Amino acid sequence: MSGHGTPIPMTSRRGGPLKGTAEVPGDKSISHRALILGAMAVGETKITGLLEGQDVLDTAAAMRAFGADVQHLGPGEWQVHGVGVGGFAEPAQVIDCGNSGTGVRLIMGAMATLPITATFTGDASLNKRPMGRVTDPLALFGARAYGRQGGRLPMTIVGAADPVPVRYALPVASAQVKSAVLLAGLNAPGETVVIEREATRDHSERMLAGFGAGLRFEDTDEGRAIILTGQPELTPQTVAVPRDPSSAAFPVCAALIVEGSDILVPGVSQNPTRNGLYTTLVEMGADIAFQNPREEGGEPVADLAVKFSSLKGVEVPPARAASMIDEFPVLSVVAALAQGTTTMRGVKELRVKESDRIDAMARGLEACGVRVEEDEDTLIVHGTGPDGVPGGGTCATHLDHRIAMSFLVLGLAAQKPVTIDDASPIATSFPAFEGLMAALGASITRPNR
């Protein structure tokens, strides 16, 4: 699959129960950060379990463009010879980040406090997404940004020749913005401080500490302060990337709604800043056993044993949104097959992801016979029960991998098949999705097959 080629329609339909083991790919967030911090360390970083989806491959190519030696050794195995903090070279060509909002925002942060200039672009979806939330705090360091109207890509960042440290309170809960500011702070003198009122995924803090950056944390009246000491020498690491909880969400949710299903999803990250979906599913009555808890690559992981479950609607608290922001699309599918109403509040961040995910899910669910309500910050799904979704709709994916996979999951439990207009974006995060689901027994087909 390719997120940049001819559209690939797909159809999913009801079949037998899902059975077997789902080996989901490495965590996308951690994969991006391992490549970037490996490029900013001095010496050789080795990475295992790296997600080899297009988003991460684009970040690997970007690190090469900035001067790091990035080599693919085998499936999931990579080696990065870094150039050190402050060692990025000015790229000769435009940096194409494809579909990845995480990739482009973190890379902008990493180069913003260097006396170099870089131009960034992406696919049609990424070029619609706002970058001001990152370029505004980077300007405080002294960087300048020149983009299209509305702060959109293509965009040129002129790095700060004499950066200054900043103190920045996040106006929205965003791990991408937090991480971009911290990466920029690496090459600024003194202490850079990021304050977050709501906890967001903390992979950057964990990995920065692992690479030897000086970090400390304080509770303030404004929120939790993350204090980074600038201009460290990062030490190369061996990084074992745990399996992605966002990718695991799709086989997990499919098993919960397809009668008779019983699957195992091993080695899934249980980072507390990422597990909001699994907390919510358990509240809905999901039969999920978290087996063999352990630590891999500095992250807590567990094996998930998942069985078909009778689910009920719940109210998802706004405070949980940041820990499951990428999983709301597939949660809305589960909610459609639960008894009662599921209300998701505090989700306005979904409006500015790869697509307007609230609108995309609402329109697709309605096309499949599910009643939905929405406002700017809320999505309400009125469940039909485990056998009540009519299906039969064709759903637009809007170049959004999570929308595509969510509606394919819906079709596995709906009364009539569900078709999506384009599955090609799935390759950005989960290139093995089609084969993995087929191996579990899912009926997902292309028109020409």
Image (cartoon, helix red, strand yellow):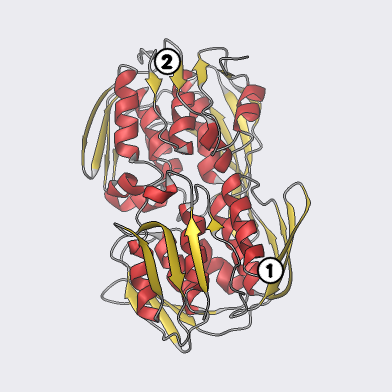
Q: Quadrant of residue 38?
A: bottom right
**What is the distance, in whole Å, between disc 2 and disc 1 at their CAs?**
48 Å
Q: Which residue corresponds to the image point at 47% horizontal and 77% vertical from the top-left?
A: 159
Residue closer to the observer: 20 or 96: 96
Residue 195 in sight in this render: no
Quick one: which residue is furthest to the right in this view?
A: 73
Q: Quadrant of the N terminus?
A: top right
Residue closer to the observer: 221 or 189: 189
Task: Using residue 315 as the reference point, say whether residue 10 is left or right of it.
Answer: right
* Residue type at numbered disc 2: Ala
Task: Using residue 371 as the reference point, say whether residue 137 is left or right of it.
Answer: right
Q: Quadrant of the C terminus?
A: top right
Percent across and percent down for residue 316 are 30, 42
Residue 135: give its label.
none
Q: Which residue corresponds to the image point at 28% horizontal and 65% vertical from the top-left?
A: 171
From the viewer's perspective, is residue 232 above or below residue 342? Answer: below
